[in-house]
Amino acid sequence: MRKKTMLIHGGIEGDESTGAVNVPIYQVSTYKQEAVGKHKGYEYSRTGNPTRHALEELIKDLEGGVRGFAFGSGMAAITSVFMLFSANDHVIMTDDVYGGSYRLVSKVLNRFNIETTFVDTSSIDEIKKAIQPNTKAIYVETPTNPLLKVTDLEATSQFAKDNELLFIVDNTFSTPYWQNPMKHGADIVLHSATKYIGGHSDVVAGLVVVNSNELGEELHFIQNSVGGILGPQDSYLLIRGIKTLGVRMEEIEENSKKVIEFLQAHPLVQNIYYPGLTNHPGHDVHTKQATGFGGMLSFDVGSEAKAAQLLANVKYFTLAESLGAVESLISVPAKMTHASIPKERREELGITDGLIRISIGLEDAEDLIEDLAEALK
Ligand SMILES: *Cc1c(COP(=O)(O)O)cnc(C)c1O
């Protein structure tokens, strides 16, 4: 089954008992048992719910894994994956990782002695240098947020395999439509489904896919024990969002190309970051492991004041955190999504105060370009 077909026909189709073409919203917490321990596969909705199960089967198929899991947010998904580790375990992590993931490991999980080293994972040598006797996993985002740095999935997974490490990939930016990290050796793929997968700025959710039954059993044990599950209504909305993921991603990419052409020609715009640009540092690696470049791009206007002015003057770009929605979103990472990263560290990473991040939506590209042109005046 090809990707676009799988978005519509993957996972569990419809409702066997009624013939309904969609899996209904099973708004239910518990299930009647015929006799003690005799039931139809569902006992209690933290453990399993048919609507959530349909979504979990669908994301499993889309990522080409063995088992899928849905959580109440991307952070709940990431936290649950980290619950696979124990005190004194060590994880190597991408340095410009999502701000919330940085906060989780450096301010919460550190209290449980789960140790993390942040490295520029776009360099396999940097990854190799960070390994310790207690290293258990490599956790990467590719492309990253907001500089769109690219990690070589194959080289990293080979190193992980050679050293018996779990290889975990946050695939939020590329989505399963453009990139399947498991094809390149990832053991666990996760998403903030709040972004492109939901796609309509109306759900907060997280998804995880694992590549073995063993990991599936472990993660289900954690999902049921920790309890950060996604509810049936939101599970339904994600299934609905996924049906149009392909057409949205194609159109968003078309719009992105047009906006970038405009930005490249503008004298105030410096340093455009987008994996689709042939001079982008990760362009070749990204092209090898993904089929599209997505709709996330960043550019520098030189100063905090200019960035603030631009943001104050756009009318179609919504000033907001988050990304991957039908509406175009604009933000200043240093003041918003990455504010929880200390300033010195942000500057080390290249997240300057004049850096603007855009998530391209589905508006007419001509309107988006006119909007930016006006605001840049
Ligand atoms: C938003 C985001 C998260 C966190 O997801 P939530 O759904 O907001 O909890 C994790 N990783 C990336 C790359 C994100 O963009």
Image (cartoon, rainbow, N blue to C red):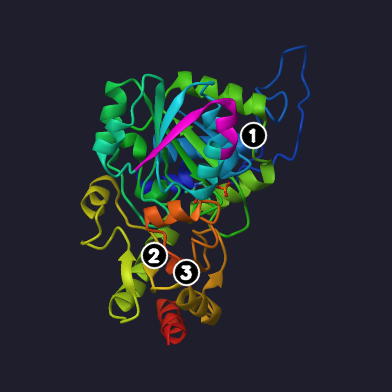
Q: Looking at the rendering, which quadrant does residue 48 occupy?
A: top right
The answer to whether residue 12 of the structure is visible from this angle is no
Reading the chain from its start, which is encountered first: label 1 or label 3? 1
Q: Which residues are magenta?
A: 107-119
* Helix, strand or loop status at disc 2: strand
Residue in the picture at 47% in, 72% down: 304
Q: On the image, numbered disc 3 is attached to which residue?
A: 362
Mark 1 nearby-residue class (10 Å; few <14, some 14–19, many ≥20): many
Q: With 53 as the anchor, is 38 left or right in this view?
A: right
Answer yes or no: disc 2 within 8 Å of ligand 1.
no
Q: Earlier in the sequence, mark 3 or mark 2?
A: 2
Q: Residue at x 39, y 35 (%)?
A: 64
Q: Residues within 10 Å of mark 3 (few under 14, many from 20)?
A: some
Q: Earlier in the sequence, mark 2 or mark 1?
A: 1
Q: Can you say which quadrant of the picture contains the N terminus?
A: top left
Answer yes or no: disc 3 within 8 Å of ligand 1: no
Given the image, on which type of amino acid does mark 2 rest? Ser
How far apart marks 2 and 1 lie (CA) works out to 40 Å
Question: How far across and down, in percent of the image, does residue 119 sit?
Answer: 36, 40
Report the residue at 50% width, 59% height from top: 323
**Eye-nearest disc, 3 or 2:** 2
Q: Which residue is mark 1?
A: 50
Identify the residue position indicated by label 2 in the image.
298
